[in-house]
Image (cartoon, grey):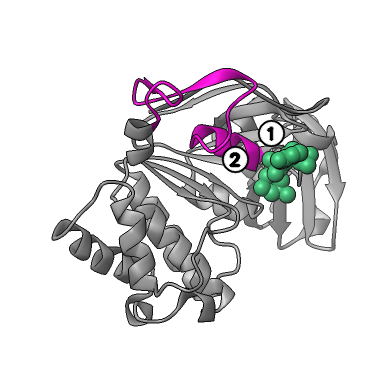
């Protein structure tokens, strides 16, 4: 469990993070979203104890980072924005080192290294110098060092950056499965990634938290009403006046020879009366699709007000 309370960070006169408060429960994965420079990395660095807050605090499993840093750091796995690799160490030496400084020793450590190497797809790279690895493989090693002590808390700053598409899918699946029993915070610019991995999202803009909830709740709160896209076989038989007269219809628009869109007032679902009306007209209803707010829409709405 992570509690972030009124977390603030100022660099000189610039407030990079302004009084941010949120919590993430065990078994929950939170996605941190925000434009470049919003403050995501700065928040993660404070949560992991790498940067002291100017104000506010972070409580992890009931412990405050700056009261018991050694104890708290042992239960955190952190993948920073730039993985902290020692380029003249082999991958195995580096993972051993990363495990040892978090208090894991043999024989558990050797087993953990084999296990995380397999999870991150680097088993055949253990003997290589990290400095000779490609960017994507360095990212995988960075992820492996975050997991090597089997932490309860995982903080991942853009974990899939630089990975190839197949590895992105595997790492997302890995994070999803790790998140079932742990507390995970990840940042990402790929909204589809956040939608597929996270139960909850926190949107940060200019250092402030502008939204924090499940995607469904955010979508409901910002609801501007359903849009129903309808495909019919006989457009000529559609009586638009009759559909417009149905309750909660805001607007109807024909978008092609066989499609039209109905905009509905927020909080209402008129699909059933629409289907009955179209059947009565003999319009030949072929398809009815509702559009709800995507994370892209939510993001743009809360960040730019668009
Ligand atoms: N050590 C530092 N000294 C001065 N300013 C800093 C420092 N670290 C971060 N900042 C500033 O704090 C703000 C937030 O930066 P941060 O790296 O947290 O953004 P971010 O949301 O992670 O962005 P990105 O999506 O580009 O990774 C930026 O304006 C940045 O320039
Ligand atoms: Mg960042």
Q: Position of residue 291 (x, y in %)?
A: 67, 46
In the rendered view, does 251 fall on the left or right side of 105? right
The total of numbered circles placed on residues is 2
Closer to the camera in the image, 171 or 41: 41
Q: Position of residue 208 (x, y in %)?
A: 71, 26
Q: Picture quarter containing residue 113?
A: bottom left
Mark 1 residue's CB less than 8 Å from ligand 1: yes
Is the C-beta of the residue carrying label 2 under 8 Å from the nearest atom of ligand 1?
A: yes
Name which residue lies at 23% across and 60% down: 112
User: For the magenta stretch, what is the residue range?
Assistant: 40-69
Image quadrant containing the N terminus: top left
- Please state which of residues 286 and 43 is positioned toward the viewer in this rendering: 43
- The quadrant in which residue 247 appears is top right
Q: Position of residue 67 (x, y in %)?
A: 41, 21
Sooner in the amino-acid sequence: mark 1 or mark 2: 2
Is residue 17 inside the magenta stretch? no
Q: Nearer the viewer, residue 156 or 24?
A: 156
**Label 2, residues with CA under 10 Å away: few <14, some 14-19, many ≥20:** many
> For this view, does 106 lie left or right of residue 206?
left
Cβ atoms under marks 1 and 2 closer than 8 Å: yes
Q: Quadrant of residue 75?
A: top left
Q: Assign ligand 1 to one image quadrant.
A: top right
Helix, strand or loop at label 2? It is strand
**Is residue 269 at all visible to an observer of this figure?**
no
Q: Nearer the viewer, residue 178 or 197?
A: 178
Look at mark 1 in the image and give the residue it sits on: 204
| Residue holding disc 2 | 32
- Residue 148 percent coordinates (x, y): 32, 56
């Amino acid at each position: 469990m992570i509690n972030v309370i009124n977390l603030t960070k100022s660099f000189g006169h610039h407030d990079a993070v302004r009084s941010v408060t949120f919590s993430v429960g065990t078994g929950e994965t939170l996605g941190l979203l925000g434009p470049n420079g919003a403050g995501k990395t700065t928040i993660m660095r404070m949560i992991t104890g790498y940067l002291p807050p100017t104000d506010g605090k972070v409580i992890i499993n009931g412990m405050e980072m700056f009261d018991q840093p050694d104890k708290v750091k042992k239960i955190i796995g952190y993948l920073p924005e730039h993985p902290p690799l020692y380029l003249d160490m082999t991958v195995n030496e580096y993972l051993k080192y990363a495990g040892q400084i978090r208090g894991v020793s043999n024989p558990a450590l050797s087993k953990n290294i084999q296990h995380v190497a397999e999870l991150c797809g680097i088993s055949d790279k253990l003997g290589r110098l990290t400095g000779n690895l490609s960017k994507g493989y360095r990212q995988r090693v960075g992820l492996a060092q975050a997991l090597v002590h089997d932490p309860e808390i995982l903080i991942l700053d853009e974990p899939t950056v630089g990975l190839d598409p197949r590895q992105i899918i595997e790492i997302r699946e890995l994070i999803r499965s790790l998140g079932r029993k742990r507390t995970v915070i990840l940042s990402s610019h790929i909204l589809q990634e956040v939608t597929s991995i996270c139960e909850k999202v926190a949107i940060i803009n200019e250092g402030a938290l502008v939204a924090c909830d499940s995607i469904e709740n955010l979508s409901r709160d910002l609801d501007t009403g359903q849009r129903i896209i309808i495909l019919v076989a006989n457009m000529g038989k559609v009586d638009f006046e009759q559909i417009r007269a149905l309750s909660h219809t805001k607007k109807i628009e024909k978008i092609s020879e066989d499609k039209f869109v109905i905009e509905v007032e927020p909080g209402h679902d008129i699909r059933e009366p629409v289907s009955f009306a179209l059947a009565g007209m003999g319009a030949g209803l072929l398809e009815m699709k509702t559009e709800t707010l995507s994370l892209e829409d939510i993001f743009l709405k809360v960040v730019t007000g668009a």
